[in-house]
Amino acid sequence: MVANLSKLGCQSIACGAVGADDSGQELISLVKNCGASADGIVIEPELRTICKHRMLSGHHHLLRMDFDPQVRWNLTQLPETLDFLRQNIPRCSAVVVSDYAKGFFQGAILEELQKAAAQGSLILLDPPLTSDY
């Protein structure tokens, strides 16, 4: 999502959580390399970063392998994430929420987004079929 927005000329700030692993560091680097800010990405020591590997042959997508550990969101840095949202949402033209049904956007984080929407911020949701934001 961040790469697509950057290619459209948008200034983006990513917010989410990654594990304290090589994949998490690689994801942060990819966000920065496409010209977006990774300031909202927190590193959670107990989390393993989700990895999706695509097998290609030329321009043909043959297979995707997902390494998707069951996630229990026990965010140790929740206060920092909430502060980040409070400080940055008012500066944004829009907030795009998409977590592929992984459950990051729940509880206090979802409540913060609801408050921002009630105050007039444009919040765009990409809800999975199994959730009702």
Image (tube, rainbow, N blue to C red):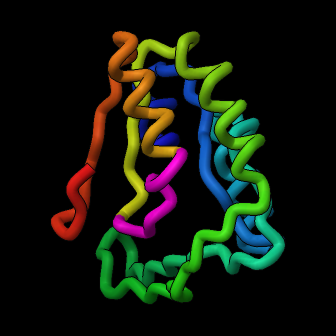
Percent position (x, y) of residue 25? Answer: 79, 62
Q: Kindly report the secondary structure that dominates the magenta region of the rendered protein.
A: loop
Percent position (x, y) of residue 36? Answer: 64, 33
The residue under the point 31% across, 85% down is 62
Q: Is residue 118 above or below residue 76?
A: above
- Asked if residue 105 can be seen in this view, the reply is yes
The residue under the point 57% across, 11% down is 91
Percent position (x, y) of residue 37? Answer: 69, 33
Q: Quadrant of the N terminus?
A: top left
Whether residue 2 sits left or right of residue 37 in the image: it is left
Q: Which quarter of the picture shows residue 79?
A: top right
The residue under the point 50% across, 34% down is 112
Whether residue 58 sits left or right of residue 37 in the image: it is left
Percent position (x, y) of residue 41? Answer: 70, 48
- Region of the chain picked out in magenta, as a range: 101-108
Whether residue 45 sits left or right of residue 58 in the image: it is right
Q: Is residue 11 above or below residue 64?
A: above
